[in-house]
Image (cartoon, rainbow, N blue to C red):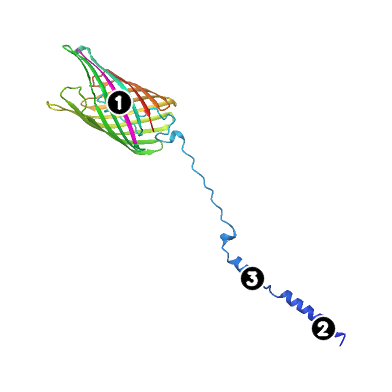
Amino acid sequence: MRTLRPLMAAALVAGAVHAQDSAPPSGPAPAVAAEAAAAPASEAAPAAVPEVTQARPPPEEFAGCNQGPAHGLPEGPVALGYFEADMATGRRACPRTEVGLGGRFGASIDTPNFYGNLGINGLLFGSFAVRPDVELFATLEAANFTYTVNAVLTATQLTLGNFTLGGAYQVLNRGTVMGGVSARLLLPTSFETPGARAVGGELGFAASWRPKGWLEVHGYLGADVTSAFSRANPYTRFGGLLMAGAQLQPVSWFAFVLDLTGRLGEVSYFAPTAGLRFRIFKFGIEVGATLPLAGNDRHDFIMGARFSWRFD
């Protein structure tokens, strides 16, 4: 019996150790495992953040209004017309803020009928961009000089000339294509015809396409009416104008413009107009000339120059 007791004690100790090794672990381990199993997949591995890329700005030649390389260079059709102030001269498609002065010289010489007329206009003009798509503009013939001669008399006159006031609204600006509607009024400020005052108005649509930085194609479609009120019966003149042209700009400070203009109405003509444009910073210069090739307009030629400073 004494020899079996140590053996039995050793067996009991070995059994207890075996039972302890095979028992499940105690303590917080099961709770940790449960929490780990219940944790959402997003906490287990953070989701990949998508890469944000900024769109590249469009090239300068496709940026639309006021984004070209020549900020102060004149735009649109050459502002040289056959009528009062800036009537029937078209309009650019892009609003801007500028002031300027200019001059216009026209000649009508009819030797077989012993008639000649020379006219010189001193112009003040300006525009104000109320918003990027809205513009107000005005033109005043501050000095209007005429020299007329026929078979029996010669007359010289210096008076205040015509004044126009208008506005434009841009309805289209899609990168390379711009377009806008405009309206202007001819106000009765001129003393050129004694005892008569000229009034009128014009509605039009201007378009511009800039496929390249060095090329701008423009057009204008308009209708105008002018009447003179006096003691005699009023004389009313209606007309429609269609203009198309292009500007070539090989460098940022110089451009060449060629326009073709046709007008139907009481006074009709078909006339090319050529212009040269320059800029020095925001100071713009435009010189041009036009002559009618067909129609009943009596002008032999018209020349002009404009000098402007741009603020926006």
Mark 1 vs 2: CB contact within 8 A: no
The image shows residue 212 at horizontal and vertical percentages of 43, 31
- Crowdedness of circle 1 by 10 Å Cα count: few (<14), some, many (20+)? many
Front one among 179 and 130: 130
Quarter of the image where the N terminus is located: bottom right
Which residue matches tag 3? 30
- Look at the numbered disc 3 and give the secondary structure of its residue: helix
Which residue matches tag 2? 8
Identified by mark 3, the residue type is: Pro
Q: Which mark is residue 53?
A: none
Residue 201 in the magenta stretch? The answer is no
Query: Which stretch did the figure color magenta?
Result: 114-129
Separation of residues labelled 3 and 1 (CA atoms): 92 Å
Identified by mark 1, the residue type is: Leu
Residue 120 in the magenta stretch? The answer is yes
Identified by mark 2, the residue type is: Met
Quarter of the image where the C terminus is located: top left
- Crowdedness of circle 2 by 10 Å Cα count: few (<14), some, many (20+)? few
Is residue 40 rendered to the left or right of residue 174? right
The image shows residue 78 at horizontal and vertical percentages of 33, 26
Q: Which mark is residue 124?
A: 1
